Amino acid sequence: MEVIVRPTNPEASWLAARLIAAAIRAKPHLVLGLATGRTMERLYAQLVQLHREEGLDFSLVRTFNLDEYIGLPATHPGSYRYYMNRHLFDHVNLDKRNTFLPDGMAGDVEAECERYERRIAEVGGIDLQLLGIGRAGHIGFNEPLSALRSRTRSKALTPMTVAENRGEFSKPEEMPRRAITMGVGTILEARQLLLLVTGETKAEILAKAVEGPITSMVSASAIQLHPSVHVICDAEAAARLNGREYYDWIFRNEPEWAPYR
Ligand code: F6R
């Protein structure tokens, strides 16, 4: 794992955007795992900027989102399909037929979860999975006690997650209490992980995830098991990290970071 701390939120997400752009340029058929939430909004705006200003080409990219609320149609402004259209898919040359999210309206949720796993396997697995972290330590909607080997399934959201996300709904009471999410085991199978974390409200949980013990109480700590992880955060989110000096030294000195310094 490498942890890279950038001074501000825009600089942290800009670095993440450029890493994603580099992955797409290196492999135009990239299978890209996507996340939603407030943290990702700036990153998606920057990817749109890279598309417009530098011609970043999404035409062959396939995307798989981590999660979707159960019971919301794609047309509902609170759904993650709607979010993705609004922040990314409508503004770049992605073929929407190559964009996948779990179907939150599926009659048979279990079958839908199996179908989603099969789809990922059919394209050869996810090359690069983008992740955010919730204050409950979740990645995707893998709330505390999610098995470290869990697969795509339906999960009940914790009261903390409901409190964090209900503000995103114009009628907060419409926020679903369950979601379909890739499992921790599904996420760990991606070839590379990129966790983007910004803001002081995430400082405590980020330190637990990166430097604490691996535990299903903090699903994000499972990324410590993965052989290829970049954690990109801003200084506020990094405030509780003990190893900050070492992480900064790596960024200043390792040749792979030279183009991004
Ligand atoms: C949603 C997802 C979640 C969010 C997390 C942080 O697709 O994967 O794990 O990344 O809840 O959300 P924000 O950025 O809104 O704090």
Image (spheres, rainbow, N blue to C red):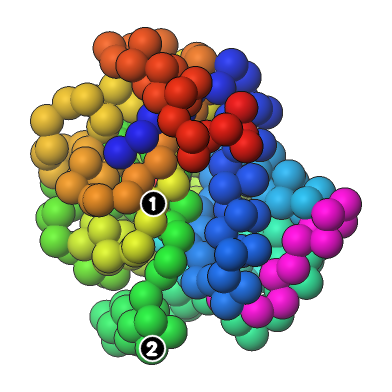
Q: Position of residue 158 (x, y in %)?
A: 29, 42
Residue drawn at 35 percent across, 62 percent down: 191
Q: Nearer the viewer, residue 171 or 253?
A: 253
- Decide: few, some or many residues near mark 1? Use Cα within 10 Å; few <14, some 14-19, many ≥20: many
Q: Is residue 115 above or below residue 143?
A: below
Residue drawn at 83 percent across, 61 percent down: 55
The residue stretch that appears in magenta: 51-63
Describe the element under mark 1 as helix, strand or loop: strand
Left or right of 126, for residue 225: left
Residue drawn at 81 percent across, 49 percent down: 49
59 inside magenta stretch: yes
Q: Residue furthest front?
A: 255
Describe the element under mark 2 as helix, strand or loop: helix
Quarter holding the C terminus is: top right
Q: Is residue 179 visible?
A: no
Left or right of 153, for residue 116: right
Q: Position of residue 130 (x, y in %)?
A: 47, 52
Q: Which residue is mark 2?
A: 122
126 inside magenta stretch: no
- Decide: few, some or many residues near mark 2? Use Cα within 10 Å; few <14, some 14-19, many ≥20: few
Q: Position of residue 102 (x, y in %)?
A: 45, 73
Q: Is residue 26 above or below residue 132?
A: below
Q: Which residue is mark 1?
A: 193
Q: Nearer the viewer, residue 90 or 16?
A: 16
- Which image quarter: residue 206? top left
Q: Is residue 28 visible?
A: yes
Quarter holding the N terminus is: top left
